Amino acid sequence: MTDSKKPGASQAGAEPMVRREFIKRSGVALATTAGAGIATAGAPRRAHAAGRTEITFASAKFFGKETIAQVVDAFNQSQGKIHVTYVELPPPSSSTEVHQSLVQQLARRNGNPDVFTQDIVWIAEFAAAGWALALDDVVDQAARKAYFPGIVEACTWDGKLTALPWFLDSGMLYYRTDLLGDAKPPETWEQLVETSQKLTKDGKARFGFLWQGKQAEVLVCDLVSFITSNNGKILAADGKTVEVAEPAVVEAVQLMHDTINKYKISPQDVLSWDEEPSRRPFTAGQAVFLRNWSYVWSIAQDKSESSVAGKVGVAPLPHFPGGKSAACLGGYQYGVNAATKNRDAAVEFVTWMSSPATQLRFATQLGLAPTRPAVFDEPSLLKAQPFMGTLKPVFVGATPRPVTPKYSQVTLVLQSEVSKALVSGDVKSAMASAKSKIEAIVKA
């Protein structure tokens, strides 16, 4: 979900509190050294009284069978060179407070905290401000290939890797297995429309397809999936060229409008819905399809909260002809303070935190989806979190939102103009207006 939801990642199988956080967005051996292809480099460590280098790690609070503090303790106990002090920030549901806290601390440029976690949409902002250490000299190309390509793209600003992947979430298609029967979930939007119309016409469901059209960050997340599945973009790779008025984008936004007004597979209510209002009719058995985040899975399978428990599947979101499934990325990632006085120690800690073994621990104990495809194949993960096994194909097409240090301004324009397009139906004019306004922002 941004911040994560500003959606961000949800935590399937974690405590109920986690669901609420992301609505607003293991017994494994722990690695004691950095992963293959990742080296430590930089200034000498400072010796401290306890004989260890002392560094601080600030992160938003997450819930699960374990806490982040326990994982940090495991690192401290795994070696005798570095001691990490964990500074707990508010949960992602209070993303504004988390963001403000990090901005205030990093802007001081005093090196505290040495390591931090950041919402995926803050990466470019922090990098452009000079607050995040570039990791190109310590994370080689082989190491980057071990992560999903979309997450590496999201962690890169101005050609430099300025964040290290932690966990991710993305939009996905939930569907009623009992209604589809032997049929496969739709791979194209056309198939989704046809199936939705047939099943609603036959009286099998009240709604065909539920999504989130509220003028909020989640609308941009939905927008990214529609646009990218038609080979369109909001911003080009240079971060300056605005492409929201291109034909592929206009066609994608037109489809969003048409699900409500032409095909009538989505109710007008989606224009005021974010995640939870769209989820409830689906788990109440009233809809065939739902676009949402991974947190929905555990609710959908809970008989006390869902009338369709055991009748729900998940698949990658559909695409246009000639396109491919695109799931908008959410999640938090690691950053190293550019002003840290303990570069070696900070890099060693953050690479340990992003290692396969530690990602597996976060996945099994906190329900945080790994950013490494290989971790999804671990038997212990499939046993502890069976749902995770279905997510790998979804994350292969994961796509970041526009990577720009001015994202907070860009997203407000997109929310406003796309909302106008969905209400008025004048998609072309709204996207032309969006282009003009975004150009003024990114080229300023």
Image (cartoon, rainbow, N blue to C red):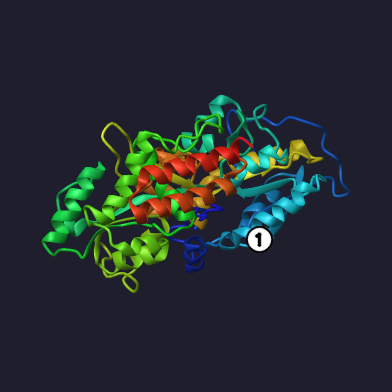
The residue carrying mark 1 is: 97
* Residue 306 screen position, x and y as percent: 31, 69
* Residue 293 screen position, x and y as percent: 41, 55
Label 1 packing within 10 angstroms: few (<14), some (14-19), many (20+): some
Left or right for 55, reference 311:
right
Q: Is residue 74 above or below residue 372?
A: below
Outermost residue toward the bottom? Answer: 304
Q: Is residue 207 above or below residue 316?
A: below
Residue lying at 52% horizontally and 34% vertically, measured from the top left: 153
Q: Nearer the viewer, residue 323 or 385?
A: 323
Residue lying at 57% horizontally and 59% vertically, measured from the top left: 92
* Residue 400 screen position, x and y as percent: 49, 41
Q: Nearer the viewer, residue 223 or 290?
A: 223
* Residue 176 screen position, x and y as percent: 23, 58
Q: Nearer the viewer, residue 339 or 421?
A: 421
Residue lying at 48% horizontally and 39% vertically, measured from the top left: 435
Task: Name the quarter where the C terminus is drawn.
Answer: top right
Q: Can the viewer see residue 271?
A: yes
What kind of residue is marked 1? Glu
Q: Is residue 428 above or below residue 143?
A: below
Left or right for 370, reference 164:
left
Provide the secondary structure element on which disc 1 rests. helix
Q: Quadrant of residue 272?
A: bottom left
Q: Quadrant of residue 308?
A: bottom left
Q: Can the viewer see residue 369?
A: no
Left or right for 260, reference 153:
left
Residue lying at 56% horizontally and 45% vertically, measured from the top left: 166
